[in-house]
Amino acid sequence: MPTIDITTTQNVTIEYELAGPQDRFLAFFIDAVIVGALFILIFLMLLEAWINELEDGGMMGRFFNLLPIMLFVSYHLLSEIIANGQSWGKKAAGIKVVRLDGEEPGWSDYLLRAVFHVVDTFLSFGTLAGLLINSSAKKQRLGDMTANTVVIKVKFNKRFQLSDILKINSIEEYEPTYQEVRKLREKDLLLIKSAIHRYHTHRNQAHSEVIDKLVDRLVTVLDLDERPTDKIEFLQTLIRDYIVLTR
């Protein structure tokens, strides 16, 4: 799968896996179902009160013609602002919106993305969005290009590498160092593993500082008496201990 490197404002380079067309279509389909349900609900609520206006083709009729577009744009804008770049469909598909410059997307970025759905999705019946996502290097539709955003995968691979398991032959042959590691969750260990990988891949001061802060946080969370001197070995030990104590 294609990936992209994004350098954060702290000068930390993070590699993300770009969301593919299938992921984005799944998110779009779920969002469309939600918006469709909202439209039907509003339609049924207003139909009885304004049945005469609808039959006459008045303002209310035009309102209902535009309502799906207004709902879809508003839904994407509000959900992505509230959920930090994830509509309900994106949450289900495990993808989210991020900025290419490493900054947190703002409401204006989400607004651009939402408004451009009119062109990307409605006026072209989704054809333009599909073509651009499939053909562009960063899998961007027009809304992404305008807002300087991309859509990435956020679902972690929930399995450790086989090599991590094979390093430990048996529980009897390995004595865990930090029993307190049971306080952590699987996603915490995946974050630790990812931080180690980024540190080895991008050796710079920023990633060293990330490792320092991560170790400090873990010492506090695990309530350890002293701070380890070899930070990377400490993190790797936590991973080994977690595998043994929880498998």
Image: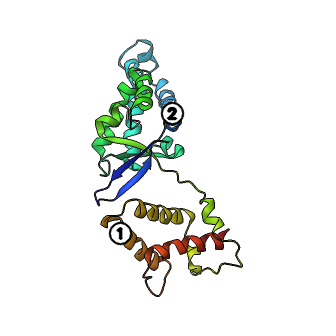
Q: Residue at x 38, y 73 (%)?
A: 212
Q: Residues within 10 Å of mark 2 (few under 14, many from 20)?
A: some
Q: Is residue 49 above or below residue 100?
A: above
* Numbered badge on residue 208: 1
Q: Is residue 43 above or below residue 56?
A: below
> Which residue in the protein does label 2 denote?
25
Q: Residue at x 43, y 76 (%)?
A: 231
Q: Calculate the distance from the C-alpha at mark 1 to the C-alpha at mark 2.
A: 38 Å
Identify the mark nearer the N-term, 1 or 2: 2
Three-letter code for the amino acid on which mark 1 is drawn = Ser
Q: Residue furthest top?
A: 56
Q: Residue furthest bottom?
A: 225
Badge 2 marks a residue whose secondary structure is helix
How far across and down, in percent of the image, does residue 214 sit? 41, 71
What is the quadrant of the C terminus in the image? bottom right
How far across and down, in percent of the image, does residue 58 sit? 37, 15
Q: Residue at x 41, y 12 (%)?
A: 56
How far across and down, in percent of the image, does residue 64 sit? 42, 23
Q: Residues within 10 Å of mark 1 (few under 14, many from 20)?
A: some
* Numbered badge on residue 9: none
The residue lying toward the viewer, choosing from 81 and 221, is 221
Three-letter code for the amino acid on which mark 2 is drawn = Phe
Is 36 placed left or right of 179 in the picture? left
Q: Residue at x 48, y 43 (%)?
A: 90
**Could you say which quadrant of the image residue 144 lies in?**
top left
The residue lying toward the viewer, choosing from 170 and 19, is 170
Q: Are marks 1 and 2 in contact (CB under 8 Å)?
A: no
Badge 1 marks a residue whose secondary structure is helix
Q: Is residue 166 above or below residue 225?
A: above
The residue lying toward the viewer, choosing from 177 and 60, is 177
Q: Is residue 141 above or below residue 238?
A: above
